[in-house]
Amino acid sequence: MIKANLHSHSQYCDGKASMEEMVKGALRKGLKILGISSHAPVPFRNNFSITDNAQLSQYCQEVRHLQNKYKDQIDIYLSLEIDYIRGITTDFETFRKNFGLDYTIGSIHLVIGDNNDHLWFIDGPDASNYDRGLHEAFGNDIYKAVSGYYHQINEMITTQKPDMVGHIDKIKMHNKNRYFSEDETWYRQLIDETLDYIKANDCIMEVNTRGIYKGRSDSLFPGEMVLKKALKKGIPISLNSDAHKPDEMDGYYAQALPALKNIGYREIYYYTGIVWEAFALD
Ligand SMILES: [Zn+2]
Ligand SMILES: [Zn+2]
């Protein structure tokens, strides 16, 4: 099995190392393919994304420079992890066209609230942001809030056409069975619906290991229930670490690969320059 990671960050956004240090980390771990995917700019103040188009241009130049510098050792690709919030974020197509991205990752980190006046931040290390946002944006109505999250993913898929959909069930991370159970029928229906959108729009579904190696989740994003459904529906998956530090490049791969095989997956997809190629899980 080839070792690869198409989801990584650096100091251009909320990563903890320079882009070149991240490339060296990938080399140390024996990766053959590395996708660099900083958080795309969003039109409001924050501490996680590339700030503006000027910095984004610099980012693209540095990826292309490193791609060339290390071309004999590793295949490097230019990407962005792009947020989608209706009426607020920039269209994926604008980023694709203006910056010549090799592929895109579409992820939801901020869910737009009931009255369009609050954003619910579902990520980050701090569960208190999750709790506060749930209250402010949805008045603690967990069904409305979680439905809002998955509907926002569905809308992103149909309107933005990301190549890969990032960590689709990250909404569970700070839940920890406090507000909802993943066994509930309504939750499973939301999962089925989103998987059908992924399948119908020919997207790749990401399997993201970050929650586990950071100790924030006891299962992959997405977890086993979702992975089993996705397998039945014939949805292609890609295993990525969402590294923010050089040493996280292959975080939890040693355990995730046999786990995926156990569930029944036989291949994993990675972008290889023109297409997404299937690599046998062995
Ligand atoms: Zn993300
Ligand atoms: Zn990420």
Image (cartoon, rainbow, N blue to C red):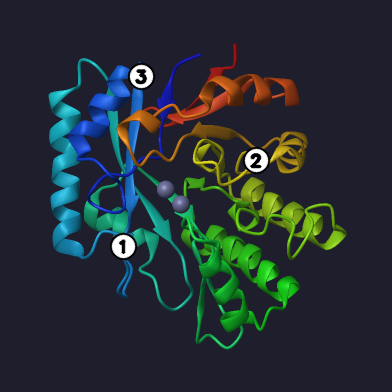
Residue underneath mark 2:
218
Q: Specify which label sits upstream in the sequence, 1 or 3.
A: 3
Circle on res. 29: 3
Image coordinates of residue 51 in percent, x first then y, are 23, 64
Label 3 secondary element: loop
Q: Which mark's residue is nearer the viewer, 1 or 2?
A: 2
Image coordinates of residue 113 in percent, x first then y, are 57, 80
Label 2 secondary element: loop
Q: Which mark's residue is nearer the viewer, 1 or 3?
A: 3
- Residue sitting nearer the eye, 218 or 25: 218
Residue underneath mark 1:
94
Q: Residue placed at 19% from the left, 40% from the top?
A: 18
> Can you see residue 220?
yes
Q: Amino acid at mark 3?
A: Lys
Q: Quadrant of residue 146?
A: bottom right
Establish if 170 lies above or below 20.
below
Quick check: marks 2 and 3 in contact, CB under 8 Å? Answer: no
Quick check: marks 1 and 3 in contact, CB under 8 Å? Answer: no
Q: Residue placed at 44% from the left, 78% from the top?
A: 87
- Residue sitting nearer the eye, 224 or 232: 224
Q: Quadrant of the C terminus?
A: top right
Establish if 84 lies above or below 205.
below
Task: Name the residue at the top extreme.
Answer: 282
Q: Residue placed at 20% from the left, 30% from the top?
A: 67
Q: Amino acid at mark 2?
A: Asp
